[in-house]
Image (cartoon, helix red, strand yellow):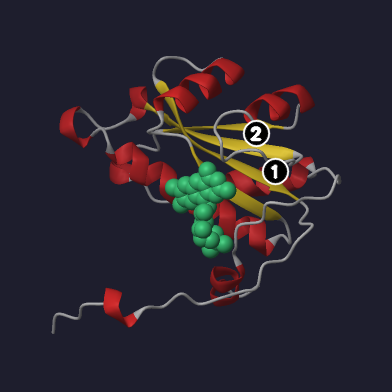
Amino acid sequence: MELKEALLKRRSVRKFTDEPVSDEMIEELLHAAMSGPSACNRRPWDFYAVTKEDVLEKLKGASKFTKFNAKLAIIVCGNLSRALPMQMAPYWIQDCSAATENILLRVTDLGLGAVWCGIHPQKRAEKKVAEFLGLKANQIPLNIIFIGHPAEEPEARDQYEEKCVHYVR
Ligand SMILES: Cc1cc2nc3c(=O)[nH]c(=O)nc-3n(C[C@H](O)[C@H](O)[C@H](O)COP(=O)(O)O)c2cc1C
């Protein structure tokens, strides 16, 4: 798929079939994630790929907006032990967001569907996800990406808005 097509076709998919996502596809998604840029190439991330049914069930309860029946969830975590020092540390959020978007685009490319569900900075949700996955104190869950074979196909769209563009020339 051409990149431009994938950019417009990527939409949040919240309904999935029962078909599992193959191990090969999961690996493809993780390769896409780690191809992303990161500040000073610190790659301050960890990825949890969950297919275990009871953990998927728990993850649905992470927040009010995470109740999705997907066969795969990838949790993108910042790993503070690999983040930049001092006031630069919060760059992990941008690094992990770039990795997340890469996953979403590859999801589209593979004919899968996904929805990005924000966890950080919701403290209660962070705590729940950390418990479900047994995270260490230096791992912060940025989001849960629920992924599966799509049972709905939101229309491709372009959200270009002239009012948001400011040329300086
Ligand atoms: C940081 C972030 C957090 C989000 N959290 C949720 C969420 O908790 N639950 C959900 O259903 N969608 C969530 N979304 C998806 C947005 O609602 C969605 O991207 C937006 O409405 C635009 O629709 P589209 O993805 O189909 O283009 C989140 C998206 C982002 C970028």
The residue labelled by disc 2 is 49
Q: Is residue 140 left or right of residue 168?
A: right
Q: Quadrant of the image for the C terminus?
A: bottom left
Give the spatial CA distance, label 1 vs label 2: 8 Å
State the residue in front, 31 or 22.
Answer: 22
Element carrying mark 2: strand
**Callout 1: CB less than 8 Å from ligand 1:** no
Circles 1 and 2, Cβ within 8 Å, touching? The answer is yes
Residue 5 placement: quadrant: bottom right
Q: Find residue 166 and report its horizontal and vertical position in percent.
A: 21, 77
Q: Is residue 127 left or right of residue 90?
A: right
Q: Is residue 144 left or right of residue 137?
A: right
Is residue 135 placed above or below 3 in the rendered structure? Answer: above
First in residue order: circle 1 vs circle 2: 1
**Can you see residue 34?**
no
Q: Label for residue 26?
A: 1
User: What's under tag 2, amino acid-wise?
Assistant: Ala
Q: Is residue 148 left or right of residue 127?
A: right
Q: Find residue 110 and report its horizontal and vertical position in percent.
A: 71, 60
Residue 63 placement: quadrant: top right
Q: Find residue 128 and report its horizontal and vertical position in percent.
A: 53, 21
Q: Quadrant of the image for the N terminus?
A: bottom right
Instruction: Say few, some or many: other residues with alpha carbon within 10 Å of mark 1 (under 14 / 14 to 19 / 20 or more).
Output: some
Q: For the point 39% across and 51% down, which residue is it? A: 37
Element carrying mark 1: helix
Residue 139 placement: quadrant: top left
State the residue in front, 68 or 6.
Answer: 68
User: What's under tag 1, amino acid-wise?
Assistant: Ile
